[in-house]
Image (cartoon, rainbow, N blue to C red):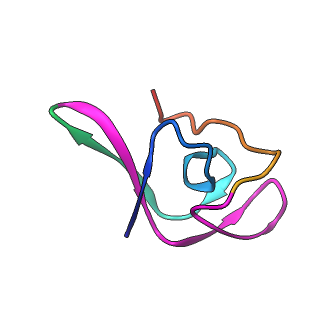
């Protein structure tokens, strides 16, 4: 599993990325997103790595 900061504009924090992911909490506060290394982007309909980025990025609704 990979980890990405909540404020990072990466595929793992984008609403369009369809990979396994979850918000990790530290001291009862959102800390990081833990995710698989690969997923599919619903916006461009193509495989994308968790660490990728593009102009279609929109914040994932589960992030604060």
Quick one: 9 or 14, which is closer to the camera? 9
Q: Is residue 23 above or below residue 36?
A: above
Say which quarter of the image contains residue 44: bottom right
Residue located farthest toward the left when viewing the structure as drawn: 27
Marks counted in the figure total 0
Query: Which of the 4 quarters of the picture holds residue 48?
Result: bottom right
Q: Which residues are magenta?
A: 28-52
Which quarter of the rendered picture does the N terminus lie within? bottom left
Q: Is residue 34 magenta?
A: yes
Q: Residue at x 51, y 72 (%)?
A: 37
Give how far across and how far down residue 14 sits, in percent: 63, 46
At horizontal 70% and vertical 54% (from top left) the residue drawn is: 53
Residue farthest top in this picture: 64
Percent from the top left, x then y, of residue 13?
56, 46
Q: Tell me if 19 is positioned left or right of 44 in this view.
A: left
Rendering coords of residue 36 (x, y %): 47, 69
Kindly identify the residue that appears in the image at 51 percent across and 36 percent down. Answer: 7
**In which quadrant will I find the C terminus?**
top left
Res. 11 image quadrant: bottom right
Of the pair 43 and 4, the residue shown nearer to us: 4
Q: Position of residue 19 (x, y in %)?
A: 55, 64
Q: Main secondary structure of the magenta part?
A: strand
In the rendered structure, does residue 64 fall within the stretch colored magenta?
no
Q: Is residue 35 shown left or right of residue 13?
A: left
Residue at x 64% of width, y 56% of height: 17
């Amino acid at each position: 599993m990979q980890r990405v900061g909540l404020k990072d504009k990466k595929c793992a924090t984008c609403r369009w990325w369809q990979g396994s992911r979850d918000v990790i909490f530290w001291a009862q506060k959102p800390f990081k997103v833990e995710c698989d290394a690969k997923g599919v982007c619903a916006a461009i309909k193509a495989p994308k790595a968790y660490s990728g980025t593009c102009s279609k990025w929109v914040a994932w609704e589960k992030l604060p």
